[in-house]
Image (cartoon, rainbow, N blue to C red):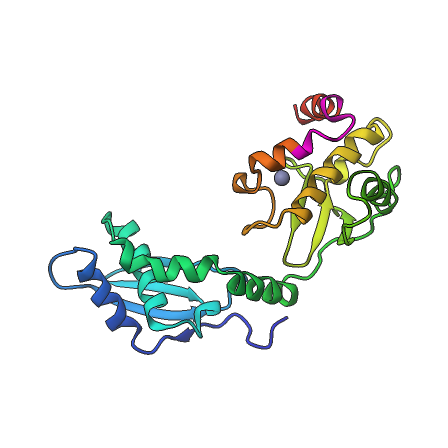
Amino acid sequence: MSPRGKVGSRVSGGEALFQRMFTRIGCEGRPPHFHVEFYAYSSLVITLRRRGDVYYVRFSDLLRRAPQEVLEGAAALLLARVFRRRPTRALVRPYLEYARSDRTRSRINHLRRRRVRPAQVSPQGAHHDLVAIFEQLNEKYFSRQLERPHIAWSSRTWRRQFGCYDPGPNQIVLNRRMDRRGVPQFAVEYVLFHEMLHVKHPTRRSGCSLISHSPEFRAEEKRYEHFRAARKFLDQLAR
Ligand SMILES: [Zn+2]
């Protein structure tokens, strides 16, 4: 657990900043009150809730050292969403560039390594050994160039996903549901192969968001020998 805990800390000048942005994105009239604090999120999320006359804003404390124009951009984006305005690009660009920069991404991953404890257990399942499968796939498709992340079976079965790669703790987790006799090795291999491609092609977001699957990713995925059979099997399993 982080020593900072989860308690927020007030952003000095936060209210004035939000009121300024309220006007700059084109809202008319007297700006409302804002209570703005930094909060120990493990990603760059920024949230806003309204209670009575006051808007409560939480900036990720990853923004704590960000320059003023970055905070302004973040505020403008957030307010534009709530008040249905269109902020100018110049106003939001500093935030977007900051959020997308490699430096910010690596700070997020670094923080997540501390805040998100690898939750799972062992790669050795009752029927399938994920480390052994990883090594085979690494040899066959990656010329052994892929560094092995943490790999584990999920501690519980999941409904929706078969696998997930989280760059924060640098961990691949596969749905325990596949660790049973009726599931052929090629299905497990395919899911692990897919997650290994996420390790090879880092993305901004963790898990399996759609943005992670570029056309190159999809093309490379088809190199897996039993691609079609595995997809077919998993489609049936998902029903
Ligand atoms: Zn994916």
Near-viewer residue (158 or 113): 113
Asked if residue 222 lies in the magenta stretch, the reply is yes
Q: Position of residue 109 (x, y in %)?
A: 60, 62
Q: Relative to residue 214, is residue 56 depicted above or below?
A: below
Horizontal placement of 33 versus 6: left or right?
left
Q: Quadrant of the N terminus?
A: bottom right
Q: Position of residue 232 (x, y in %)?
A: 71, 21
Near-viewer residue (79 or 91): 91
Residue at the left extreme of this rendering:
29
Q: Which residues are magenta?
A: 220-229
Asked if residue 156 lies in the magenta stretch, the reply is no
Horizontal placement of 3 versus 71: left or right?
right
Image point (11%, 60%), residue name: 29
Q: Relative to residue 64, is residue 158 depicted above or below?
A: above
Q: Relative to residue 90, is residue 71 depicted above or below?
A: below
Near-viewer residue (5 or 87): 87
Q: Quadrant of the C terminus?
A: top right
Q: Position of residue 225 (x, y in %)?
A: 78, 27
Ligand 1's image quarter is: top right
Q: Position of residue 66 (x, y in %)?
A: 42, 71
Q: Relative to residue 149, is residue 130 depicted above or below?
A: above
Image point (52%, 41%), residue name: 211
Residue at the front extreme of this rendering:
143
Horizontal placement of 123 versus 120: left or right?
right
In this rendering, the count of numbered labels is 0
Image point (56%, 42%), residue name: 212
Q: Quadrant of residue 178?
A: top right
